[in-house]
Amino acid sequence: MRKKFRTQAVTAGVTVALALAASLGMNKALASDQHQQPVAEDADDDLLSNVEELALGYQPFRGDQNRNEIPDGAELAKRCAEIINLLPRNGLPGANQIYRICHELDGLERCDVCSEWIHMGGCCIINPKLGLRYPDPHDPLDPQFLPDLAMHYMGHGSFEYSGDVHGRGRLDVPLLLKALEMPRQCGHLGTIYLPGDHNRDCKENLADFAEFADKWLRCTDPNDGQCD
């Protein structure tokens, strides 16, 4: 009886130790950049709320699904920022190419975390094929455009932003990914399809994204539409 109890105690201790180690590892990752503030109702502390994770096809209790020691939300935010920065400015009439419209405004605002001065402007993302605009112009809660302040925070791995002009806000993550034509099912974050990659072979049909595709994606055969 004592032996059985001792075995159960050791097993329980190992389980607790593993849980604490995982928690400490995630907290260490979160603490690496103060821009990555905790998110409400985020069971796995990966900077995505439970509702956002379900909408994206993520697992709400696995904060690092590709096991690279980066919280899923932080990794996804940085990749979104990379893609948006590569979008062409303004679109061609009749083209299905995703593009951005930049809004140049006078003035600067200060980031609440690092005190860096950020341009007051921003951009709108237009997806002609899906008839989508981000932010949604019909949602009174959304800003008129994606602020440069939000891009600053995304570059640091956060979909939440805070400044002395725009105040505190959070991006509509599912709508943003839809506008960028990134897949809803992103369980393996190493496979992120780019806008314009209609056959899902990880090869961008638009020359503007070729460098990004080579950087982030590795394909075995460019003709069979399959990724590693």
Image (cartoon, grey):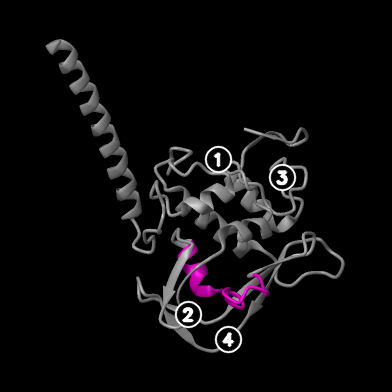
Which of the marked residues, 3 or 1, is nearer the chain's N terminus?
1
Q: Residue furthest bottom?
A: 106
**Which of label 4 and label 2 is nearer to you?**
2
Residue extent of the magenta highlight? 136-154
Which of the marked residues, 4 or 1, is nearer the chain's N terminus?
4
Distance, label 1 to label 2, CA atoms, is: 32 Å
Distance, label 3 to label 1, CA atoms, is: 20 Å
Which of the marked residues, 1 or 2, is nearer the chain's N terminus?
2
Left or right, 22 with respect to 180, comes to left
Residue at the spot of label 2: 166
Q: Position of residue 140 (x, y in %)?
A: 60, 77
Are the residues flagged by discs 2 and 3 in contact, CB closer than 8 Å? no
Residue at the spot of label 1: 187
Front-lying residue, 138 or 160: 138
Q: Residue at x 34, y 49 (%)?
A: 29
Q: Is residue 224 above or below residue 100?
A: above
Distance, label 4 to label 1, CA atoms, is: 38 Å
Residue type beneath disc 2: His
Residue type beneath disc 4: Leu
Q: Position of residue 145 (x, y in %)?
A: 61, 75
Mark 3 crowdedness (10 Å alpha carbons): few <14, some 14-19, many ≥20: many
